[in-house]
Image (tube, rainbow, N blue to C red):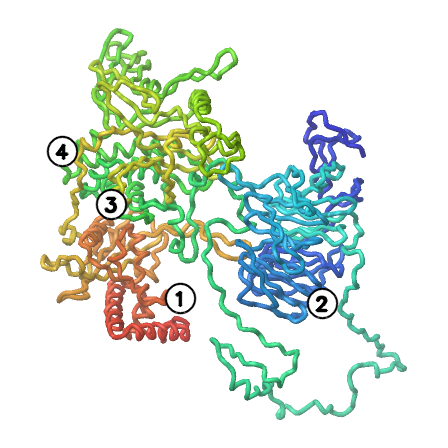
Amino acid sequence: MEFQPHSGEQYPATEYLEGTIPVEGYVGEDGHAPIVEEYAEGPPLPIPGSYRELHSLMADGGDHFGVSAVAFDRQEELLWMGNQGGHVTSYYGTQMQKYTSFQMHASREIRQITTFDDGVLGLTSDSLHCHARQGLRVFDYRGESLQDMQCMLIYNGTHLLMGGHQTLLVEFDLMEGREVATFTAQDPGVAIMRHGTNFICCGDTSGKVHLRDLRNLKVEHVLDPHSGTLSDFDVHGNQLVTCGYGERNGGLSLDRFLMVYDLRTMRPMNPLHIPIEPWYLRYVPTYSNRIVVVSQTGEFQLLDPGGLVTPEAMLLYQVNIAGDMTLAVDVSSNYKAIAFGDSGGYVHQWTDSEEVTFNAFPRETEFAHPPEHHPPLSISNEFASYSCVPMPYSEGPLLSDWPAEYCYPVVRQAPPIDPEILRSMKVVQFIGYAPNPGTKKRNQVMYKEVKPEKRKGKGNVPESPLGRDADTHMYMVPKYYRKVEIKYSKLGVDDFDFRHYNQTNFAGLEPHIPNAYCNSMLQLLYFVEPLRCVLESHLCTKEFCLACEMGLLFYMLDQSKGQTCQASNFLRAFRTIPEASALGLLLGEAEEAAGKANFPRLIQSWNRFVLAQLIQDTATAESETETGTDRVKQMFEADVKTEVKCRCGKETERSSVSLLVTLTYPEFLPPTPTRPAKEVSFASVLQNSMLLDQTMQAWCDDCNRYQPTSQKRTYKRLPDVLSINCHLESNSDIMFWKIQEQLAHARDAEAHKQQLEANLASIKMCRYGQACTRQGCKFRHMDERDASNPLLQEENKASWLPLGLRMRLNKDGTLEIKEIRDDEKVDSSGFVDYYLHASIAHIKDVRTGGNLVAHIQVGKTYHKRKEGVTHMQWYIFNDFSIESIERHEVVQFNMEWKSPCVLFYMREDINDHYDITINTPIDHTVLQPEASLSQGALSHSTFTPLDVDELPKEGDIVGIDAEFVSLNQEEAEIRSDGTRSTIKPSQMSAARISVIRGQGPLTSQAFIDDYISTQEQVVDYLTKFSGIKPGDLDATISSKHLTTLKATYLKLRYLIDCKVKFVGHGLRKDFRVINLLVPHKQIIDTAALFNLPKQRILSLRFLAWFFLGMNIQSETHDSIEDARTALQLYRKYLELTEKDPDDWQKELKRVYSEGRSLQWKVPGTA
């Protein structure tokens, strides 16, 4: 078949054969593109050297685990596979007849399989296993030097080299079954090993390949083919080919270039460009040095590294993996067959013909002997020889036929153990170990002691090779802009490293709560200093008051020293407001999960609604003075006058207020060669949007009908905080902003070019030229050193959006707006300066709908409180991720992945016009008992309120416990390896909070025992663990002391402000669900006191039984009983530690020893 360049004409899709893939750019003699028959049975392909699928089958255990390793046997005609559950199966010949199947490891993933003369080797993360080909175990090896192993390689015939994500290479003798040597490996270890002609090549996840000498395994050369991590490489002769990741626009993405090296000169050759994303590669040197390149989606192609274009190189093959991922690839020793393993549990075999062998000179495979079949005997054959029947025949009773009275089952006794072994035996846990006294045969090998693997902290970056290309489509988006998610473990978020994302002392917000899309706006409002002071001083009796909840949230953000907070109580109040639901501000979980949420529209509507709600809440508060109420209005409200003129000549005026400005853009006409784009300033767009002059239909009383009327808006007073909704709803508006950004960049680039030329002329040439060796030489050298000179750096920081505005309100109500640029002089007489305080940006992502981030200029007062310095700095707030950024990033929006939503301009001297002191509104009156919300008959009181002389003081001790109910179920998934992964935790709500006295005559008596009423649907009362029953939280039928969450929350806030110390068990989770931030020095957690490092947390019930002799929680939990028990345990702790600290450690070890023997259960309980 001849291949000729395609003319570019496209063929209809109906002309392609089913199950085939066309190759662009080439056609055959029949006028069609060359194709690969993927799944169809039939004769082999006409192109020499091409491959086709011969067999595809599900391996043993494939319905639960993916295939993690495949390997062709180098001695016999066998194909081996291992899965993620530790099972190994072998198949004989091209028909893939099952040969052996056995469990190599109980649960660990088989990471690599290789064969040698005496058997098959399997490597897991912490062990090496050797089995005969028939399945019998030869030896298992575990050692301290095997930690997170990844690869192995046989060299010198009987020696095995093993490597992994550690700094050791382990040499193992297969004949003696022992470790003989270790070699140092550079961090981060070894992920891939290949045997070359003169070297052993070791690749790691940093993108480097180390070439080691075959004799002493010392590193002789280091190749650095990829700036990111290494995906795979292979060696043949004097050639080495690699594939991997490269850094691009601040992220990692797969290189579509294969890097080729000549091992004779140690120099790179021309890289090879390929059309697929390379994940694995292997040499297939049949008649040329071909390589097979495989993608994770199952595509593969055969290429020549030298660039030779052959017919088979034009073919693109597709393995039938049905949407799964390719996890393993291997090529037979004679290159006639290729095997693939996928995450769906299937093994695929591709060959170049129907009848092939895997090895050039294979060894004969040993099969089990067939059972011996005796010839049948006819009962009518008088001459048949009954002696061939394998059973003695006798007319009398057989000797083995004993009477029943003499027969009874007897257990076979084990042989006695050598007394020397018993004398020298050492018991570790429940296993005894002793040296061989020499009385046993030499082939009875002892098991070596298995030490528990040390747990290492796992980073937030996915390990190689899975999970590395999850965000390749967002390569242009910097990491700190991307959507961040909490990775949940069995400990919830306790072991999640939030500080990895936030190195500042400012507080982030968690994103897993429903409607947490507004986190960025909450952060923005918090950093408006006058608003923060007003809201933290505000308190009213309204149950669901957004101003109160926002003030309490701002207090938490104030007290936090870098800890991540939650806006759960604020969002709970937000969900209960009917107007929020009517305006569509409540985001459904299904809509958010499907990525269909319109976040720019949502956050702009949220901005308009919340500003109005804050003014309304502060205006109706009983505890707020008129002056305080006016402060919020003065900040955001602008007094507006609208003049309406009818066609009939009637003119009317209407006064109103405006909380924000919605931008309206001029009509956008796409630029053409004859009509270039016109540059329009942001100030003019803002001015036209504020002084809106429009014509619309309106009712006229004189005409008694709707008439076209002209409406003109003027301003009487400007706000101190100018809130702007960008309103980029149409494509024409988006293109207008984008074109203006490009024009601003072009203008600045021209000015910068002229400045560079002037700077270049002003810097003298160095007298030494390029031979100069002085560090930090300030002269020109005409080489790469000039790029580090700040006067010669080419960086475009231009933007259409200005960092400042100067506004002047004239007597006639008209408005003048001028932009403040760094390089411009503006007349400031009569103008008020506004600086850009913050902006909300939408980061686009087609999969999830994107996310919202806030750019905020944090002022001096915040830095002084949090960081101890007085300066201003821009930060990006992305939920719990906080990073400092340059100010030019704030105003640059390329509209490809980042678009503006909300802008806040604030008066430069705003703090001088407001009182920024905080008057804490919470006092001891919140502890006074309030009337119960319950309408049912109340049972006896379970608490005694505090008297005036019992009011808490600094250092007082109180016991506390809380019970919770679930508002929605946890969302989890089962991975292919059988492990359980939490996608979204269950949302909990406080149902009962009890606080007891820690001193005084009424010690251990409760003074708070509140059941929390909820208006949200409870999906699980968790009665077994909480003691809460259906109806206890219903105000119509409950017999409990029912209150609002806000009332109980204020009581706890008052106790925190009084600096009392809280004693309880597992208080970290309790305070997290209640949404309270308590200083560490005010928490005494018995779960931490009665705990050994790196050991399990003991339950309150077990501790009470062991130390106090009490049996609590026998039927259900009671928060008063739990709080009282925690207080008694704390006193017991003080009593034991005062005597002798060493005795306390012995006591802790004794309780853990007792717990293990009882399996952590209290005796006498189920």
Q: Quadrant of the N terminus?
A: top right
Which residue is tagged 1?
A: 1095
| Amino acid identity at mark 1 | Gln
Kindly indicate the quadrant of the structure image that contains residue 898.
Answer: top left
State the residue lying farthest toward the left: 949
Which residue is tagged 3?
A: 555
SS category of the residue bearing label 2? loop
Q: Is residue 1117 visible?
A: yes
Q: x%, y% of residue 804?
A: 31, 26
Q: x%, y% of residue 919?
A: 16, 43
SS category of the residue bearing label 4? helix
Q: x%, y% of residue 881?
A: 38, 43
Disc nearer the start of the sequence (3/2) = 2
Q: Is residue 742 visible?
A: no
How far apart are the alpha carbons under marks 2 and 4? 91 Å
Disc nearer the start of the sequence (4/3) = 3
Q: Quadrant of the C terminus?
A: bottom left
Kindly indicate the quadrant of the structure image that contains residue 723.
Answer: top left
Horizontal side of residue 1047 vs 459, given as left or right: left
**Which residue is nearer to you in this view: 1008 or 638?**
638
How far apart are the alpha carbons under marks 4 and 3? 23 Å
Tell me the residue at 49%/80% (across/down): 426
| Amino acid identity at mark 2 | Asp
How far apart are the alpha carbons under marks 3 and 2? 70 Å
Q: Residues within 10 Å of mark 4 (few under 14, many from 20)?
A: few
Which residue is tagged 4?
A: 626
